């Protein structure tokens, strides 16, 4: 095995060198930028991606693709630079000059390490959209890493009006962004005084969930995109510990009623006050085996390189599309092995303290406003991330080409722009007083009528126990359990809409993820108690959206 690995490594090195020697533009890109470096494996993968883009006619020359990939390196670098300023400073110098003691916050806060790790991922997502000419949707489970999302969006000016007005791409705008981050400012009416938060919120362009409950994104993503839509879901290795049920995603995915999904785990070795089961059981090698046993196709990528994320998104979607075609032709059967990207990195890569436990929050040894050593360390390591204004503007011009591609900006991706409308069924059957009819039986009948009046709307029924014992027999017979091997004479189907699992969070999140359709969750009170966290997160997020004048357009989820 070791000899084979050595041969593969040697062949990879050989191919990467051949591409560099043959294409000067490829050689220039391969050098990376600042802390962004491209491994030989990533170089070979990216070269193959370039050829695919040329073969599809999306680009005419490899140099065009490489210019955009170089812009990705620079965008990621600038966003990492901005993230560390958001944690520590009250001032941003667009010329990159060193900051003095008065330029630092008296109480720096932020999940700096995780945010730094998210920057290459989100920047890669943005550039993958540019290369494909498609606006994919995005979802982030670790909502505390919002600084990465805001930093990239501010640099690209992919913002909602309230942020665009306050954070223009100028020294003043970036300084305001840094000052507002974790400022705890309050308006006179008691609401937040700035359009910025410590977690993903309705002012985060394209944000879908707050992400305060780690693990709920893992349960929702497979139920989110409709056919024809694409979703990149950024997930946390810590969430794997906190919430079970994400292992079952391949059980639920069907090409006939699901869009393309690309789960991406940011594997930065979470360790705050405890060691995770994953790392006690054998680390990532154990996790790869775990994924394979649960019908995933794990793909390792370099989590420090935006180009690796770009390649991974294209590769994941291509594999899923190929599997879907084989199923349509009768050459494959469900479950499909869902591609699953594992972005291996170290907590806080790119800045001082990377890989240490301190990188989870504020990685410097002290407060730069009062500690000279920490101040010097900040200036030294921030300088490694600095991107001159002229290079930043060139990178932005390469990436922000939405009008030329005739596509919507990422703040208006499909999943956050739901506007579901239903055709009303016929008048319900009313019962007279004293008629011995179960209220649940009436709900059962009426839900079937709603579905039959709107057959084009995808349905998800969340069910952690027995649907028929809850007097929902008509719904079960009509919509059926979603299973992989239906039994004869039982209300089961490969394409059933009833999601049944002995995990209350998994079934309620199946409904909450299906914001493009019609949903119902049926359970007992005892089971329902574990659903309250997910419901609370959704209710608060929707309430805040409404307060901003952007109420959600998805249907309420009866539980």
Image: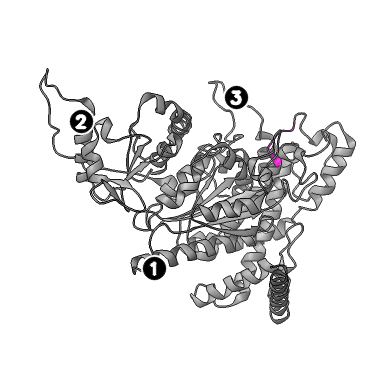
Q: Which of 178 and 456 is in front in this view?
A: 456
Residue 491 spot, x, y in % from top left: 26, 45
Residue 190 found in image quarter: top right
Q: Is residue 546 left or right of residue 131?
A: left
273 w.r.t. 83: above or below: above
Q: Name the residue under label 2.
A: 441
Q: In this view, does 539 lie to the left or right of 297?
A: left
Magenta-highlighted residues = 108-112
Residue 198 among those drawn in magenta: no
- Image quarter in which the C terminus is found: top left
Q: Name the residue under label 1.
A: 326
Question: Residue at left 66%, top 35%?
Answer: 181
Q: Name the residue under label 3.
A: 186
Question: Residue at left 41%, top 55%?
Answer: 259
- Image quarter in which the N terminus is found: bottom right
> Which SS class for mark 3?
loop
Closer to the chain start, of discs 1 and 2, is 1
Q: Which of 142 and 522 is in front in this view?
A: 522
Closer to the chain start, of discs 3 and 2, is 3
Mark closer to the observer (3, 1): 1
The overriding secondary structure of the stretch rendered in magenta is loop
């Amino acid at each position: 095995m070791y000899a084979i690995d050595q041969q593969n490594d040697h062949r990879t090195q050989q191919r990467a060198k051949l591409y560099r020697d043959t294409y000067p533009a490829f050689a220039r890109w391969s050098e990376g930028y600042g802390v962004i470096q491209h491994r030989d494996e990533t170089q070979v993968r990216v070269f193959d991606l370039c050829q695919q883009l040329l073969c599809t006619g999306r680009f005419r020359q490899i140099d065009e693709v490489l210019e955009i990939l170089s812009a990705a390196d620079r965008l990621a670098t600038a966003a990492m630079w901005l993230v560390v300023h958001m944690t520590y400073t009250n001032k941003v110098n667009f010329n990159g000059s060193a900051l003095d003691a008065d330029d630092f916050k008296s109480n720096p806060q932020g999940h700096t390490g995780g945010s730094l790790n998210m920057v290459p991922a989100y920047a890669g997502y943005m550039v993958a959209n540019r290369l494909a000419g498609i606006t994919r949707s995005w979802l982030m489970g670790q909502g505390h890493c919002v600084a990465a999302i805001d930093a990239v969006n501010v640099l690209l000016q992919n913002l909602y009006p309230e942020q665009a007005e306050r954070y223009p791409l100028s020294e003043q705008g970036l300084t305001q962004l840094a000052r507002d981050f974790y400022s705890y400012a309050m308006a006179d009416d008691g609401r937040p005084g700035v359009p910025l938060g410590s977690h993903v919120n309705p002012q985060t362009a394209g944000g879908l969930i707050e992400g305060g409950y780690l693990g709920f994104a893992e349960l929702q993503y497979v139920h989110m995109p409709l056919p024809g839509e694409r979703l990149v879901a950024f997930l946390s290795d810590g969430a794997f510990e906190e919430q079970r049920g994400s292992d079952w995603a391949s059980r639920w995915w069907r090409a006939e009623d699901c869009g393309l999904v690309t789960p991406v785990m940011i594997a930065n070795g979470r360790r705050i006050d405890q060691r995770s089961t994953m790392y006690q059981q054998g680390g990532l090698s154990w996790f790869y085996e775990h994924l394979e046993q649960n019908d995933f196709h794990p793909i390792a990528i370099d989590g420090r390189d935006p180009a690796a994320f770009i390649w991974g998104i294209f590769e994941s979607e291509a594999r899923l599309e190929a599997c879907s075609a084989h199923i349509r032709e009768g050459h494959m059967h469900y479950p499909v092995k869902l591609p699953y990207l594992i972005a291996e990195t170290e907590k806080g890569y790119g800045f001082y303290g990377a890989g240490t436990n301190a990188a989870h929050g504020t990685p410097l040894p002290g407060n730069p406003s009062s500690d000279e050593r920490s101040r010097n360390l900040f200036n030294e390591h921030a300088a490694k991330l600095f991107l001159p204004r002229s290079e930043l503007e060139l990178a932005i011009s390469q990436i922000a080409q939405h009008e030329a591609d005739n596509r919507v900006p990422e703040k208006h991706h499909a999943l956050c722009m739901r506007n579901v409308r239903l055709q009303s069924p016929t008048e319900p059957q009313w019962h007279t007083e004293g008629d011995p009819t179960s209220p649940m039986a009436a709900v059962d009948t009426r839900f079937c009528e709603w579905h039959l009046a709107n057959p084009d709307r995808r349905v998800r029924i969340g069910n952690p126990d027995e649907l028929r014992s809850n007097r929902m027999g008509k719904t079960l017979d009509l919509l059926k359990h979603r299973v992989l091997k239906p039994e004869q004479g039982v209300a089961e189907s490969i394409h059933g809409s009833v999601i049944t699992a002995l995990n209350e969070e998994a079934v309620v999140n199946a409904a909450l993820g299906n914001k493009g359709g019609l949903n119902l969750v049926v359970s007992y009170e005892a089971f329902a108690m574990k659903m309250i966290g997910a419901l609370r997160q959704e209710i608060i997020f929707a309430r805040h959206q409404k307060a901003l004048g952007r109420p959600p357009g998805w249907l309420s989820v009866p539980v």
